[in-house]
Amino acid sequence: VKHTVEVLDATTKEQLCFLDKVDPHSTIGDIKSLFYKSYPQWYPARQALRLDTRGKSLRDDEVLQNLPVGTTATMYFKDLGPQLGWTTVFFAEYIGVLLTYLVFFFRVPYIYSHTYALTSSPHPVVKLACVCHTFHYVKRLMETIFVHRFSHGTMPLRTIVKNCAYYWGFSAWLAYYINHPLYTPPSYGELQVKYALFTFAMCEVGNLSIHMSLSNLRTDGFRVRRFPTPTKNPFTWLFFFVSCPNYTYEVGAWLSFTVMTQCLPVAIYTLFGFIQMTIWAKVKHRAYLREFKDYPTVRMAIIPLIL
């Protein structure tokens, strides 16, 4: 039996589209594509379809016949605004962060006193911090190109502007103090820097290992749903204890960078990052528990045995 789908504006309740003879096995993604033919200005990524004006947006992979509707379905449309793909989002964020930091590292004129324009710091830790910061974000860019597997998810343009302001602004703040002519090296000197560098490197390798492990979970065309498990790579053994070890390693890398530079703005950025990553990790952890009945109960969200 074919279905009919009526699409109304979520705000005005005005009928926007009436789709006749829709296959019951059609997904929400298919319906969005049909709607797009009538309204080319609203490409599928801009569309949110709901069964109720204040209800949750339907996922693209939900099937029409599995929804709590009869043979005639009424859906409410909301325009999500201009969207950009995740690859574009990450490139905008990371390239901006890289360039912002380097502007301060090379002491471009008018940032500090003209006496120090285009000079370099005499402290080796300042150069090392620049290498670590650059490596961290170049690694993220490489992961975006070669490791991460994105579905058709997008981000609203206004959110991207906000995210870029956050990342670029913090990058400028960190870089201003670390590369400042009056910057003082860490209290415990070379020993503190070496230990922090070792921990930073281990966390970066661990973070990459987890991202590659998560990427391998999606080799079946995004269809097979499994939860991540440890592999022969020792860096993935953190999966025994936490659901999101990529965030654990990320926080570890920024804590190491904080110790290495002994800089307050870096510590504040690390704290804010930890709070946000904890929120994301808890959401992911709850989703795993909900979806998989055999999910290991010993796992925490981000910090083993604690959080």
Image (cartoon, rainbow, N blue to C red):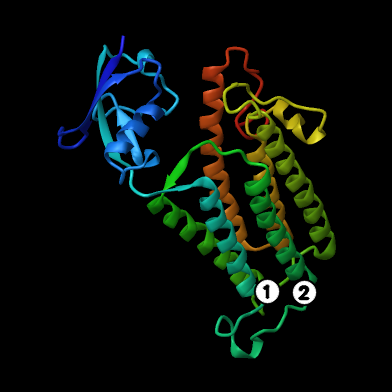
For image coordinates 33% across by 35% down, the residue present is: 48
Q: Position of residue 256 (x, y in %)?
A: 72, 53
Which of 85 and 55 lies nearest the eye of the viewer?
85
Sequence-first tag of 1 and 2: 2
Neighbor class of circle 2 (other Cα within 10 Å; few <14, some 14-19, many 20+) is: few
In the picture, the disc for residue 183 is 1
Which of 42 and 148 lies nearest the eye of the viewer?
42
Q: In the rendered view, tell whether residue 307 sits above or below residue 74.
A: below
For image coordinates 48% across by 39% down, the residue present is: 153
- 283 left or right, relative to 204: left
Q: Position of residue 264 (x, y in %)?
A: 61, 62
**In what quadrant of the picture does the C terminus appear?**
top right
Q: Residue furthest top?
A: 1
Q: Amino acid at mark 2?
A: His
Q: Secondary structure at mark 1?
A: loop
Q: In the rendered view, tell whether residue 30 sits above or below residue 148.
A: above
Q: Position of residue 61 (x, y in %)?
A: 45, 25
Real-space CA distance between mark 1 and mark 2, rounded to the nearest whole angstrom: 9 Å
Q: In the rendered view, tell whether residue 193 sits above or below residue 56.
A: below
**In what quadrant of the picture does the N terminus appear?**
top left
Question: Disc 1, disc 2: CB below 8 Å?
Answer: yes
For image coordinates 52% across by 25% down, the residue present is: 286
Q: Secondary structure at mark 2?
A: loop
Can residue 58 be seen in this snapshot? no
- State the residue position of label 2: 123
- 141 left or right, relative to 41: right
